[in-house]
Image: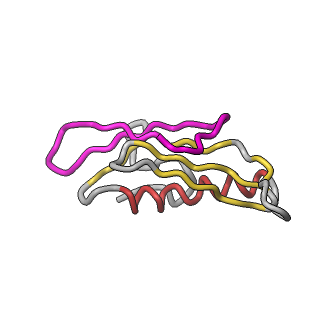
């Protein structure tokens, strides 16, 4: 588990299957509610956490306001999932390829 762990987060559970396997494995994505960035001159940040791969992922994404920080977290999730997914993995949400994080969230 992450050392950061958002105290308030929106959570989505995806299903991952590997080519040639019928085993379904859960991948949990959490996007924390935006908070003020404690860095001097910082604006806002939202914590993105992903569990279900070999190593947990945790990183803040920033914006000039709460909405921009939250959307930055949502929009980057599909790219992070592509990077973390093993070769031959298929991620689905509610049985479909659209993972629901924006217009480009389908993972091939």
Nearest the viewer among 40 and 99 is 40
Q: Position of residue 107 (x, y in %)?
A: 39, 57
- Say if the magenta span includes residue 17: yes
Nearest the viewer among 30 and 7 is 7
Q: Position of residue 38 (x, y in %)?
A: 79, 54
- Say if the magenta span includes residue 4: yes
From the image, which quarter does the C terminus lie in?
Answer: bottom left
Which stretch is magenta?
Answer: 1-28
Residue at image location 47% in from the left, 62% down from the top = 79
Residue at image location 55% in from the left, 50% down from the top = 101
80 relative position to 65: left or right: left
Residue at image location 42% in from the left, 36% down from the top = 94
How has the structure been colored for display?
Answer: secondary structure
Q: Position of residue 6 (x, y in %)?
A: 63, 40
Q: Residue furthest left?
A: 20
Q: Position of residue 80 (x, y in %)?
A: 47, 59
Q: Does 28 sit above or below residue 53?
A: above
Residue at image location 33% in from the left, 49% down from the top = 54
Nearest the viewer among 43 and 22 is 43
Q: Residue furthest right?
A: 41
């Amino acid at each position: 588990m992450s050392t950061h762990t958002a105290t308030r987060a929106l959570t989505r559970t995806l299903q991952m299957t590997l080519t040639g396997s019928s085993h379904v494995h859960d991948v949990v994505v959490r996007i924390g509610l935006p908070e003020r960035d404690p860095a001097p001159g910082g604006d806002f940040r939202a914590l993105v956490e992903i569990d279900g791969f070999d190593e947990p992922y945790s990183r803040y994404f920033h914006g000039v306001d709460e909405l921009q920080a939250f959307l930055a977290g949502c929009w980057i999730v599909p790219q992070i999932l592509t990077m973390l997914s093993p070769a031959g993995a298929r991620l689905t949400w509610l049985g479909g390829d659209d993972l629901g994080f924006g217009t480009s969230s389908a993972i091939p």
